[in-house]
Image (spheres, rainbow, N blue to C red):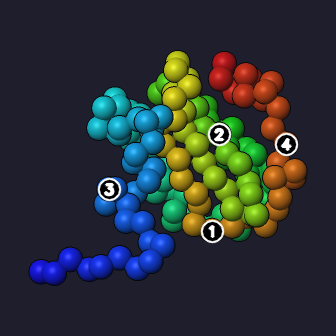
Amino acid sequence: MPVPIPRAGYERPLCRRYCSCLKPAMILMHSRPKEQREAIRNLVQLVLTRDMATFNPDRFKDWIKDTDARFRKTGLTLQFEIRSRAVHFTIKEIRTSRIAFKFTASSHVPFEDRDVVMNVEDFAKAAH
C-alpha cells in the first residue's frame, strides 16, 4: 500500500494514540487497584449516559459531594471545572496528587461555574 505524501505545513503525529495517553502524569489504568478502576469506570459511564442539563446548581453540588466521598474511600478525589457550560472532570490520587483520569461530560449544564461555589470545609465534612 503506498504511503500518502503529507501536505505542506502538515506534521504527522509521532504516535497513533491519543495525546492524553502520552502525558507522563496520567496513570495507566491497568496498574490501578480494582476498586479504583471500577469507581472511575462507573463515573465515566454515569456521566456519559446522564443528561447534565437536568442538574441545577444545588443538585450538582450535592452530587459532586456524594461522588467525591465515594472516591475518597478508594484513595481518589474528584475535581471538576465548568468552562463554557461543559463540565471537565479530573480524578486524582489523594496520596500523590497524580492525575488518574480526565474527561469531559458529553452534555452541558444550564449554569455557570460561579453558580456552584464549593468550600474546602464541605469536602472535609463529607470525608469524615
Q: Are marks 3 and 2 in contact (CB under 8 Å)?
A: no
Q: Is residue 19 left or right of residue 121?
A: left
Q: Is residue 42 visible?
A: no
Name the element at disc 1.
strand
Q: Quadrant of residue 69?
A: top right
The residue that appears at 34% across and 56% down in the rendered structure is 14
Q: Quadrant of residue 70?
A: top right
Q: CA distance from mark 3 to mark 2?
A: 29 Å
Q: Which mark is residue 79?
A: 2
The residue under label 1 is 107
Looking at the rendered structure, the kind of residue marked 4 is Val
The residue under label 3 is 15
- The nearer-to-camera label among 3 and 2 is 3
The residue under label 4 is 117
Q: Nearer the viewer, residue 105 or 70?
A: 105
Q: Is residue 97 left or right of residue 119?
A: left
The residue that appears at 60% across and 38% down in the rendered structure is 78
The residue that appears at 58% across and 57% down in the rendered structure is 104
- In the image, residue 37 sits, relative to residue 51, either above or below, namely above
In primary-sequence order, the first of circles 3 and 4 is: 3
